[in-house]
Image: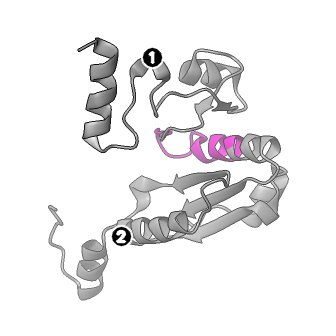
Amino acid sequence: MAVNSLVKQLIKESDNDMASVVSAGILGDCSTFVDTGSYSLNALLSGSLYGGVPSNKITCLAGSESVGKTFFALSIAKSFLDNNKDGLILYFESEGALTSDMIKERELDVDRFIMFPVATVEEFRTQCIKVIEGVPKEAKVMIFLDSLGNLSTRKEMEDSASGSDKRDMT
């Protein structure tokens, strides 16, 4: 059996709609980027001054408090909205620090910027899944979580409310 025929047969037998030969491209390949507003950060993330955040990947901005992570997130959100006239920003926020004035000052389209306040990891997971399931396949959306480090677990919240100082090791 020729290699080409065998490859096609194996992909068919896998019953995996996402399976493909690498020469045809891989689902995770990225051809589009969202500008971060910083040539240096663009180059670090994509290898190009004009690239930025890969449009089909999860990207994490990590750093100490008050170093500008939210500023970069808003810059990326603005670039995304500017380049996707029907695009939406889904912004899950756990710090209570982001204000409508901050969004307006950075000239983001406030009618396409949806804020979801969350306090626990479980709230974020549940709300994000529900929202994603409601997004049409052809829609252009960018999702932000600001900030993961500030989210508690439901158990931590319950322990705190009951006065328990036990540590959640799960």
Which residue: 57% across, 42% down? 69
Helix, strand, or loop for circle 1?
Answer: helix
Q: CB of mark 1 within 8 Å of CB of mark 2?
A: no
**Residue 37 visible in the current orientation:** yes
Stretch in magenta: 61-76
Mark 1 sits on what residue?
Answer: 23
Mark 2 sits on what residue?
Answer: 122
Which residue: 51% across, 66% down? 133
Q: Nearer the viewer, mark 1 or mark 2?
A: 1
Vertical comparison of 43 with 60: above or below: above
**Residue 95 visible in the current orientation:** no
Q: Position of residue 102 (x, y in %)?
A: 76, 57
Q: Position of residue 150 (x, y in %)?
A: 42, 59
Q: Position of residue 119 (x, y in %)?
A: 44, 71
Question: Which class describes the residues within 10 Å of circle 2: few (<14), some (14-19), or many (20+)?
Answer: some
Q: Quadrant of the C terminus?
A: bottom left
> Furthest residue to the bottom?
162
Q: Position of residue 152 (x, y in %)?
A: 35, 66
> Furthest residue to the top?
2
Helix, strand, or loop for circle 2?
Answer: helix
The label shown at residue 115 is none
Inspect the image, locate mark 2, and give the three-letter code of the amino acid beneath it.
Glu
> Furthest residue to the front?
1
